[in-house]
Image (cartoon, rainbow, N blue to C red):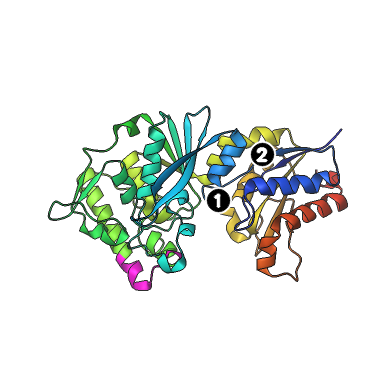
């Protein structure tokens, strides 16, 4: 009787989508066992690839839209996903306001905005959905979701009663929050945040100091940004009676986690747990003999909400062997895998590894399957 494999990798950053990784793993298996049953479940953890993974896993569709990019003058073509017969929208904030949309010299979290993310939410509401899942990874913003809220009708007024400017550098100008224009349809929609980080909004472990440097912030800018986030959170607490700045994940995506909780009543969840639920991964693993997962890098951070660890935890419930493949294998603790395999030959450059990742993943899987007695894993 042919063996059944569940293939549940994340994307391999800069080289393969999760779906492409599934295809490479399947080729590697079927090069050895042509009749093997392969159940592909492209995975994500709320970051890059979440929309595509859930569209692929659930037979959803892409909805094209034009929104504001990370800088207020940009217009970009992007998309979000519709699944569950059009009732659930999957939004990846990075598709509108991600770090990959700006060259390094353009990145300035004093100026970048989440306005486009709010415009995607508005476009989803226009389709009469009942649930929105928003992935927060890969942002280039630090505005606590103020831009997102503005797109949904919130007004932020300065001391003169005029609209405050966009961007994390202007949050300290906000003196009054006017919710009278907030899109009323938000009250009829369940909004879930898929986050792969648990940072609070402010302070040494907050959005500005931890993630600011990769978004172009200097040390002086980080101090300004953190002060501005604190000011914004103070105004929210004083005028709206909401204080969620210390909630784990409030600092995700430059504080977009905070803004979504305040202005849309969103609930924050582990990104990989949400994706596991949406893809019904447990049901698929229950019928498998073996589970193969992976992503670009597996190291000690993997256990803090990354996809392979989440997959391994589900497999553990059913006592299924889990083999993980990675481009880079770093320092490890006990992560619950039966085995972790590095796919790259030792002598190649990182550039070459990224360019040929699909081939190396297929070869590593094929070699492993060919040489290993799977019965020993059980």
**Residues drawn in magenta:** 214-224
Residue 326 visible in the shown view: yes
Q: Of all residues shown, which one is farthest toward the left?
A: 160
Neighbour tally class for label 2: few under 14, some 14-19, many 20 plus, Cα within 10 Å: few
Mark 2 residue element = helix
Question: Does residue 377 belong to the magenta stretch?
Answer: no
Residue 340 visible in the shown view: no
Q: Is residue 293 above or below residue 297?
A: above
- For marks 1 and 2, the one nearer the N-term is 1
Question: Does residue 221 belong to the magenta stretch?
Answer: yes
Cα gap from disc 1 to disc 2, whole angstroms = 17 Å
In x, y percent, where is residue 190? 41, 33
- Please tell me which residue is depicted at 46% across the width and 59% down the height of the picture: 99
Instruction: Indicate the quadrant containing the C terminus: top left, top right, bottom left or bottom right.
Output: top right
The secondary structure that most of the magenta stretch takes on is helix
Instruction: Indicate the quadrant containing the N terminus: top left, top right, bottom left or bottom right.
Output: top right
Q: Nearer the viewer, residue 24 or 186?
A: 24
Q: Is residue 369 above or below residue 63?
A: below
Q: Nearer the viewer, residue 306 or 142?
A: 142
Which of the 4 quarters of the picture holds residue 8?
Answer: top right
Q: Is residue 195 left or right of residue 209?
A: right
Mark 1 residue element = loop
Neighbour tally class for label 1: few under 14, some 14-19, many 20 plus, Cα within 10 Å: some
- Please tell me which residue is depicted at 20% across the width and 51% down the height of the picture: 163
In x, y percent, where is residue 162? 16, 52
In x, y percent, where is residue 90? 49, 39
Q: Which residue is mark 2?
A: 317
Q: Pointer 1 and pointer 2: residues touching (CB < 8 Å)?
A: no
- Please tell me which residue is depicted at 82% across the width and 51% down the height of the picture: 366
Q: Which residue is mark 1?
A: 305
């Amino acid at each position: 009787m042919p063996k059944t494999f569940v293939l549940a990798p994340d994307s391999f950053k800069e080289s393969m989508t999760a779906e492409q990784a599934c295809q490479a793993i399947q080729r590697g298996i079927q090069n050895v066992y042509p009749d093997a049953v392969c159940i592909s479940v492209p995975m994500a953890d709320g970051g890059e690839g979440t929309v595509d993974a859930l569209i692929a896993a659930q037979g959803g569709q892409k909805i094209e839209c034009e929104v504001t990019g990370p800088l207020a003058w940009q217009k970009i073509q992007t998309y979000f996903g519709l699944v569950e017969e059009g009732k659930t929208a999957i939004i990846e904030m990075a598709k509108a306001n991600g770090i990959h949309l700006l060259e390094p010299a353009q990145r300035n979290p004093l100026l970048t905005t989440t306005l486009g993310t709010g415009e995607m939410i508005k476009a989803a509401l226009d389709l009469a959905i009942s649930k929105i899942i928003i992935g927060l990874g890969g942002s280039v913003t630090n505005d606590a979701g103020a831009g997102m809220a503005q797109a949904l009708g919130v007004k932020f007024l300065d001391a003169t009663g005029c609209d405050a400017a966009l961007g994390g550098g202007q949050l300290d100008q906000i003196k009054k929050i006017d919710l009278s224009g907030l899109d009323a349809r938000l009250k009829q929609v369940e909004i879930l945040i898929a986050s792969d980080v648990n940072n609070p909004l402010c302070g040494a472990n907050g959005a500005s100091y931890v993630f600011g440097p990769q978004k172009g912030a200097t040390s002086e800018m980080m101090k300004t940004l953190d002060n501005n986030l604190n000011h914004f959170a103070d105004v929210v607490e004083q005028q709206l009676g909401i204080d969620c700045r210390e909630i784990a994940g409030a600092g995700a995506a430059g504080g977009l986690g905070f803004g979504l909780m305040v202005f849309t009543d969103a609930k924050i969840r582990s990104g990989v747990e949400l994706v596991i639920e949406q893809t019904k991964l447990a049901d698929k693993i229950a019928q498998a003999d073996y589970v193969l997962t992976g992503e670009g890098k597996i190291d000690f951070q993997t256990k803090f909400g990354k996809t392979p660890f989440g997959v391994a935890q589900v497999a553990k419930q059913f006592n299924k062997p889990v083999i993980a493949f990675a481009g880079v294998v770093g320092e490890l603790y006990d992560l619950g895998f039966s085995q972790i395999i590095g796919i790259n030959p030792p002598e190649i450059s990182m550039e070459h590894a990224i360019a040929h990742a699909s081939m190396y993943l297929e070869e590593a899987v094929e070699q492993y399957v060919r040489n290993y007695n799977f019965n020993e894993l059980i």
